[in-house]
């Protein structure tokens, strides 16, 4: 088990190094000279040269990379080229907002998706199964920002059940916090619910047709116990989809945060991209990859516990 854990940790660290390093060079190639975007078109050549020297952009690219990387491994992502505030502080203020929405969306998708998947697996071809197929077609065809706007129009502007925009921290008000993340979480979770339900439904039917399930039924086990055995053997595929969806929801949070005006890492990514604030983009990339590594690592541990064969990979 220790070898299994070590391999997963090593692969996660390697992924973090490769992605952040690649992002550094690609960002510099894409942005070019950032001084025009940071200072505006009215900036003089002297002002641009002074800013290049201040942010270290006049140094060779490899020297810039080593300076950033050597500090990043200690958790120091440098300072923003726009506000000259520590990047880590800016991200730390926004991560709780994004995680609140993404975790809420993941939990909602897991609970509803598992319930719908099991229900459809127990009665394939039934009404619930047909509704699931229709929902998968409709939700995959509709863009996320459109769903967000529909939720805002109906539940915020017309029914006034939830606030249309803004975020309330749980320190200020737990009730206000729940209200502020409900609509964004639902907007993120709708597509994920369908994906989890379909994956679990298909895995459930596949496992239910195996010989050991027929043996359990022949031994007289109750339907509830047989369903529990089938669900445990069908769960690894759904867990994998859930972990991948969590990563995907982090990316989808950008659109949702813009629509609901949430001060999360999605809106920070958008603003940093528009002005070419590379240190902020690199810090956001590193933090996102850390989330991906941690989620995948936890997934591997859970799968290794559910299915011991996974540990042998």
Image (spheres, grey):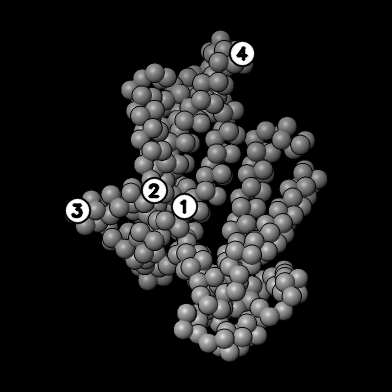
Disc 3 element: loop
Residue closest to the eye, 216 or 253: 253
First in sequence: mark 1 vs mark 4 = 4
Residue closest to the eye, 52 or 13: 52
206 up-or-down from 197: above or below: above
First in sequence: mark 2 vs mark 3 = 2
Displayed quadrant of residue 309: top right
Q: Which mark is residue 159?
A: 3
Tell whether label 1 touches label 2 (CB within 8 Å): yes
Q: In the displayed image of the protein, which residue is found farthest to the front?
A: 45
Report, in whole angstroms, how far the alpha carbon at label 2 lies from the one at label 1: 8 Å
- The reply, left or right, for residue 264 in relation to residue 289 is left
Image coordinates for residue 307, horizontal then vertical, percent: 67, 33
Mark toward the viewer: 1 or 3: 1
Classed neighbour count for the residue bearing mark 4: other residues with Cα under 10 Å, few (<14), some (14–19), many (≥20):
few
Disc 1 element: helix
Report, in whole angstroms, how far the alpha carbon at label 2 lies from the one at label 4: 42 Å
Label 4 sits on residue: 211
Residue closest to the eye, 37 or 226: 37
Looking at the image, how many numbered discs can be counted on the residues?
4
First in sequence: mark 2 vs mark 1 = 2
Label 2 sits on residue: 144
Displayed quadrant of residue 166: bottom left
- The reply, left or right, for residue 151 in relation to residue 71 is left
Image coordinates for residue 268, horizontal then vertical, percent: 48, 67
Label 1 sits on residue: 252
């Amino acid at each position: 088990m220790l070898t299994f854990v070590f391999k997963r940790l090593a692969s996660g660290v390697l992924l973090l190094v490769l992605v952040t390093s690649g992002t550094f060079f690609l960002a510099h190639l894409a942005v070019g000279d950032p001084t025009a975007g940071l200072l505006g078109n009215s900036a003089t050549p002297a002002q641009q040269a002074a800013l290049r020297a201040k942010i270290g952009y006049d140094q060779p690219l490899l020297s810039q990379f080593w300076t950033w990387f050597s500090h990043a491994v200690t958790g120091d992502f440098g300072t923003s080229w726009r506000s000259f505030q520590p990047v880590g502080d800016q991200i730390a203020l926004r991560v709780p907002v994004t995680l609140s929405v993404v975790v809420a969306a993941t939990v909602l998708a897991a609970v509803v998706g598992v319930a719908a998947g099991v229900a459809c697996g127990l009665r394939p071809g039934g009404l619930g199964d047909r509704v699931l197929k229709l929902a998968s077609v409709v939700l995959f065809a509709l863009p996320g920002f459109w769903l967000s706007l529909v939720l805002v129009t109906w539940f915020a502007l017309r029914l006034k059940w939830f606030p249309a925009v803004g975020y309330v921290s749980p320190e200020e008000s737990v009730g206000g916090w729940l209200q502020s993340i409900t609509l964004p979480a639902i907007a993120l979770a709708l597509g994920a619910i369908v994906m989890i339900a379909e994956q679990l439904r298909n895995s459930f039917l596949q496992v239910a047709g195996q010989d050991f399930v027929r043996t359990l039924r022949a031994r007289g086990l109750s339907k509830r116990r047989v369903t529990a055995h089938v669900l445990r053997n069908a769960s690894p595929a759904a867990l994998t989809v859930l972990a991948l969806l969590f990563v995907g929801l982090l990316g989808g949070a950008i659109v949702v945060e813009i629509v609901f005006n949430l001060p999360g890492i999605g809106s920070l990514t958008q603003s940093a991209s528009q002005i070419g604030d590379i240190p902020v983009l690199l810090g956001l990339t590193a933090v996102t990859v850390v989330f991906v590594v941690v989620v995948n690592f936890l997934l591997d541990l859970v799968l290794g516990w559910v299915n011991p064969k996974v540990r042998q990979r």
